[in-house]
Amino acid sequence: MSSSATAEVRPLTAREFEQFRRLAYENFGLDLREGKQTLVAARLGKQVQKLNFRSFNEYYRYVLEDRTGDALRALIDALTTNHTSFFREPAHFDFLRGTILPGVRGRGRIAIWSAACSTGEEPYSIAFSVLEELGEAAPDKVHILATDISTRVLAEAECAAYPSARFAGIPPQQLHRYLLRGEGRFKNWYRVKPEVRGMIEFRRLNLMESFSHLGAFPVIFCRNVMIYFDRPTQQDLVNRLAASLEPGGYLLIGHAESLNAVRHPLQYIRPAIYKKAEGRAGR
C-alpha cells in the first residue's frame, strides 16, 4: 500500500474495468455492462484513494489477496446503491395487509423473508404492517428474516435509528405506537421500539449462494435487486425464490423490475406481485 495519501490515481484502464466486472459478476451476480466504466471509476476511485493506492490494479490485487472477505464486501458496497425508504412502493404493503396476511392469519407461526433488506426500512415497514393487521398477537406469531449481502447496511438496520425526515408521510399514531423519539442530540431521530425489533432477525446472505436451508415462506420481498443482474442470473434467482415459496405463496419484486423475459413457474397477480400455484410441492 502506498504511503502517499495525495498521489494522483491513474485512470481506470479497459483491462482493469474487465477485472472488476468479472469479479463482481462471479461473486455477486452484479452485471456491470459496457458503458459503466465511468461509474465504476468514480465509485471504486474513492476506495482506491481511501486506501492510498496509486492505481486500480493495486486495489484489485488487494481485494483478491484479502482473506477476510471484508475488502470484497466493501467493493460491492461501493458499486451498489442502497436507496430505500419506509413503505416504499406502498401498494405492496396494502396487498400484504389486505390479501396475504388474512390468508395466513389462522396458522400458528408466520415467516416472512425480506431479501436485500438494505438499511432496514423494508423489514420494519413489514413489521408495522403486520402489527396493524394482526395486533398484539403479531410479535409472538410473526418472524421476519431480513437479509443483505452488506454487513455495513445490516449494522444500520439492526441499530434501527433513523432521522425523523425518513418518516415523512407516516401517520402520527403509527409513529407513537412503533417508535421512540430521541432526546438531546438525538431529538430529530426515532428508534424502532424493542418489541418491533424483536420480530426481525437480520442475517448476511449472498443471493448468488444457496438459500434452500432457510425453509419455505408464504411471502418473499425481493425488491429492486434484480435490476443489477443479467437475464440468466435473474432467471436462476427467481426460480430459486419460487422454490422457497410455500404453495400459494407470494413473491414481491420492485415495480422497476419485470419477470416477462424470464421463465418461471409463478402466476402474475398484479404489477410486481407473483404467486406460486396452490398445492405445488415445495422443492
Image (cartoon, rainbow, N blue to C red):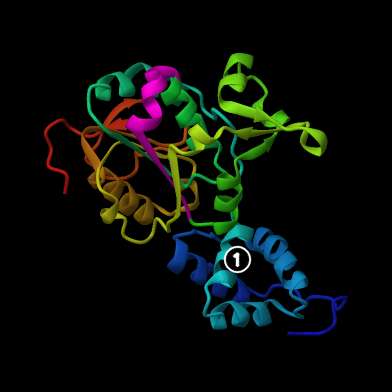
Q: Residue at x 74, y 74 (%)?
A: 51
Total numbered circles: 1
The x and y percentages for residue 160 are 60, 40
- Which structural element holds mark 1? helix
Judge left or right: residue 266 versus residue 223. Answer: left
The x and y percentages for residue 125 are 51, 30
Q: Residue at x 27, y 48 (%)?
A: 239
In this rendering, is residue 225 above or below 59? above
The x and y percentages for residue 178 are 56, 26
* Residue bounds of the magenta highlight: 132-148
Res. 187 in view:
yes
Whether 139 is among the magenta residues is yes
Q: Nearer the viewer, residue 155 or 195?
A: 195
Whether 35 is among the magenta residues is no
The x and y percentages for residue 138 are 38, 26
Q: Nearer the viewer, residue 223 or 99?
A: 99
Q: Nearer the viewer, residue 226 or 108?
A: 108
In this rendering, is residue 49 above or below 106? below
Disc 1 marks which residue?
75
Furthest residue in direction right, as rendered: 6
Residue type marked 1: Leu
Q: Nearer the viewer, residue 218 or 64?
A: 218
Judge left or right: residue 26 versus residue 267. Answer: right
Q: Residue at x 50, y 38 (%)?
A: 197
Q: Is the N terminus in the top left, top right, bottom left or bottom right quadrant?
A: bottom right
Res. 271 in view:
no
Residue 139, by quadrant, is: top left
In this rendering, is residue 124 above or below 105? below
Mark 1 Cα-neighbour bin, 10 Å: few <14, some 14–19, many ≥20: many
Residue 17, by quadrant, is: bottom right
